[in-house]
């Protein structure tokens, strides 16, 4: 497999009135051609910040990449100029946002918003771009695309708008598509349609997808590999099967346990007690130690190294150290009863 | 759309009729009468004059007569100059008033927009603070204070521009500028706030994620959306300019409607008071209608909701 995107030890900080918030603290992962990688974690874990740093769309006065490299086709995006980034955004790497109700310009027709990227990156004439826009709308399943292309966003429903956003993101055949919670703002039936559409389009175009989400159901649907983020770090990565059936990190156990299950005996929803760490003064040791039921003294003092569980599966937890006591994942974290 | 406009025009006429009625009776409550304070007139002369202008009739009859004439577009004769119609006074005064007002509005809006855009793009820098300090001064200090300062420093001390009167283009600059200060300040503040808000929206991020250059994002996506509230305040502001020009016209001795209006109240010139009030009211109602139509052109969401064409 060919490496398309390689993040190496990325650190991102925000300057706020209260001080420096270290939102991402040493994230590394690779994305291969045509694969889909899910980044999961709760709010504030640094998922969106990581994806915005790849696009270099961090709020430019306060947010910056402090350290690390983002290699995309041999070029380090962390050091690319704004002009170089303009050529990459939309053409090579594009993005889908969470809320389709706000991610389209209300005063510009749908067609013009699709055509913008095409005209910029592919030097299309107005009529060529419009034709392509109509085709794209057809591709994402919008009926009467010839008419709808001249309409405004408020004339589209939420699900339709997300389809339009997907059409815009895919308009220039990007190599990487970053989907930042693409289904979070949609209702469940529409969610399934959008996921189907994304999977279908991935098969057709071979675009690699980075899927940012906190919904493990979406992960199971779309991703091949998963990276679990917590406190600005990746705590566990592996294939979907490894993460769902052989999770090693107590945080991943917590995430899996808090997924509502239909056949559960207790009606109560399980949650991970406590709150995520304050990233203005991040803990010295493992970020999850304060909430972890298995925490040991070493967890509070030292950050665990990422340990290889298998060739594709890594977790950063002291429990994997040979000196640690043997701990089995709790019953609730087991998906489908596999052990 | 046509139905919508027709409906609005009918409401406009009703509004004007109500304004005419209220003003008519309020005016009758003013102490004195047009020919009372002229000592030189004898009792007979006064009676003859009152008779000539129909002022001896009972008030309700005067009202009916007035409204009947008004419906035919006739605003009557002024009491101050023999044989001159109010219509001609308004038409003559209209030119200078409209010119000053329009120049102030145009200049103020353009400068205000540029200042606001600059302040938003240079958010939290010296330029931003500077522009906003200017804006606060512009809002806080009334236009006639600027008028006085400009007359003294630019007109009297430096002698660059004429202090008053209305004899050519160079006479427009000081009054139009004094009037536009408030416009600049208001527009700049609104534009800055709106731009900042829109720069933070998802669709700006989305546009940037398409690879659209920064300047194109600002002008094609941000400015147009920021203009929506500007159009809304432009109406009341244009109205403010019309009424504000009453004072400015007096200070610069511009022969506009404002000047006529003030003079007419001083001498109880009923037809002129009525005529100018109605004319101002007409302008205001018309501006509101124009703003509503403009609003629909800029914002497609309102276009659909407003009128089913």
Image (cartoon, grey):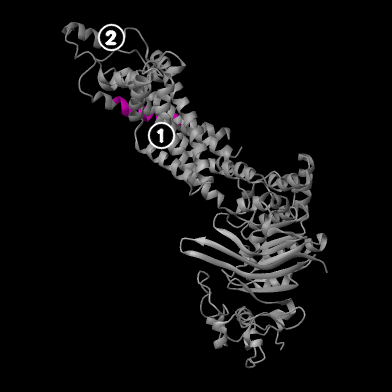
User: Horizontal and vertical percent for residue A5?
Assistant: 74, 64
Residue B51 belongs to the span the image colors magenta: no
Magenta segment boundaries in residue numbering:
B12-24
Q: Is residue B10 left or right of residue B159?
A: right
User: Residue A34 lies in what quarter of the image?
Assistant: bottom right
Q: Is residue B127 left or right of residue B43?
A: right
Query: Picture coordinates of residue B193 (x, y %)?
Result: 48, 46
Q: Nearer the viewer, residue A234 or A253?
A: A234
Q: Is residue A147 visible?
A: yes
> Which residue is located at x 55 percent, y 67 percent?
A22
Where in the figure is residue A140, as x and y percent of width and height?
75, 56
Residue B52 marker: 2
The secondary element bearing badge 1 is classed as helix
Q: Which mark is residue B182?
A: 1
Quadrant of the image containing the N terminus of chain B: top right
- For the residues carrying marks 1 and 2, which lies nearer the camera in this image? 1
Could you say which is closer to the camera, residue B110 or residue B79? B110
Q: Quadrant of the C terminus of chain B?
A: top right
Q: Are marks 1 and 2 on the same chain?
A: yes
User: Magenta stretch containing residue B21, yes or no?
Assistant: yes
Between marks 1 and 2, how big is the CA–CA gap?
A: 45 Å
Question: Which residue corresponds to the image point at 78% horizontal and 40% vertical from the top-left?
Answer: A125
């Amino acid at each position: 497999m060919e490496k398309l995107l390689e993040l190496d030890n990325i650190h991102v900080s925000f300057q706020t009135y209260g001080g420096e918030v270290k939102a991402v603290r040493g994230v590394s992962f690779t994305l291969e051609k045509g694969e889909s990688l899910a980044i999961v974690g709760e709010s504030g874990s640094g998922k969106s910040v990581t994806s915005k740093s790849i696009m270099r769309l961090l709020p430019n006065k306060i947010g910056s990449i402090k350290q690390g490299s983002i290699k995309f086709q041999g070029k380090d995006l962390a050091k690319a100029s704004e002009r170089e980034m303009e050529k990459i955004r939309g053409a090579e790497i594009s993005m889908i946002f969470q809320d389709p109700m706000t991610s389209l310009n209300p005063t510009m027709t749908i067609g013009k918003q699709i055509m913008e990227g095409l005209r910029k990156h592919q030097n299309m004439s107005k009529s060529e771009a419009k034709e392509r826009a109509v085709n794209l709308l057809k591709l994402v399943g919008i009926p009467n695309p010839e008419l709808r292309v001249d309409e405004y966003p408020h004339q589209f429903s939420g699900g339709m708008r997300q389809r339009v956003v997907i059409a815009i993101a895919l308009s220039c055949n990007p190599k990487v598509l970053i989907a930042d919670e693409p289904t979070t703002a949609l209702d469940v039936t529409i969610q399934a349609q959008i996921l189907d559409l994304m999977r279908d389009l991935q098969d057709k175009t071979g675009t690699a997808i980075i899927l940012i989400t906190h919904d493990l159901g979406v992960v199971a649907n779309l991703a091949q590999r998963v990276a679990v983020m917590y406190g600005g770090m990746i705590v566990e990565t592996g294939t979907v099967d490894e993460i769902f059936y052989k999770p090693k990190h107590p945080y991943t156990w917590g995430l899996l346990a808090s997924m509502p299950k239909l056949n559960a005996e207790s009606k109560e929803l399980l949650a991970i007690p406590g709150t995520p760490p304050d990233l203005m003064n991040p803990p010295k040791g493992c970020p999850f130690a304060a909430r972890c039921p298995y925490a040991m003294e070493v967890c509070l003092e030292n950050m665990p190294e990422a340990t290889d569980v298998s060739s594709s599966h890594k977790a950063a937890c002291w429990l994997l150290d040979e000196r640690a006591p043997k701990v089995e994942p709790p019953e609730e974290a087991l998906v489908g009863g596999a052990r | 759309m046509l139905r919508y406009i027709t409906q609005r025009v009918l409401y406009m006429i009703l509004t004007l009729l109500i304004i005419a009625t209220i003003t008519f009776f309020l005016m009758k409550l003013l102490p004195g009468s047009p020919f009372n304070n002229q000592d030189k007139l004898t009792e007979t002369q006064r009676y003859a004059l009152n008779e000539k202008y129909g002022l001896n009739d009972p008030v309700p009859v005067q009202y009916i007569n007035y409204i009947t004439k008004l419906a035919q577009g006739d605003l009557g004769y002024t009491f101050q100059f023999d044989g001159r119609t109010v219509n001609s006074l308004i038409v003559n005064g209209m030119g200078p008033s409209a010119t000053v007002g329009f120049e102030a509005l145009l200049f103020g809006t353009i400068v205000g927009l540029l200042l606001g855009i600059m302040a938003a793009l240079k958010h939290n820098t010296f330029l931003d603070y500077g522009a906003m300090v200017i804006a606060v001064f512009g809002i806080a200090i009334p236009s006639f204070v600027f008028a006085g300062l400009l007359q003294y420093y630019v007109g009297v001390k430096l002698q660059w521009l004429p202090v008053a009167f209305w004899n050519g283009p160079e006479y427009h600059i000081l009054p139009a500028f004094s009037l536009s200060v408030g416009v600049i300040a208001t527009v700049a503040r609104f534009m800055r706030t709106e731009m900042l808000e829109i720069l933070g929206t998802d669709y700006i991020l989305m546009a940037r994620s398409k690879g659209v250059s920064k300047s194109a994002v600002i002008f094609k996506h941000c400015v147009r959306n920021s203009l929506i509230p500007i159009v809304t305040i432009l109406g009341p502001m244009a109205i403010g300019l019309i009424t504000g020009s009453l004072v400015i016209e007096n200070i610069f001795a511009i022969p506009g409607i404002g000047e006529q209006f003030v003079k007419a109240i001083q001498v109880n010139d009923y037809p002129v008071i009525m005529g100018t009030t109605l004319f101002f009211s007409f302008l205001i109602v018309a501006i509101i209608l124009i703003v509503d139509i403009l609003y629909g052109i800029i914002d497609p969401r309102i276009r659909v909701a407003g009128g089913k064409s």
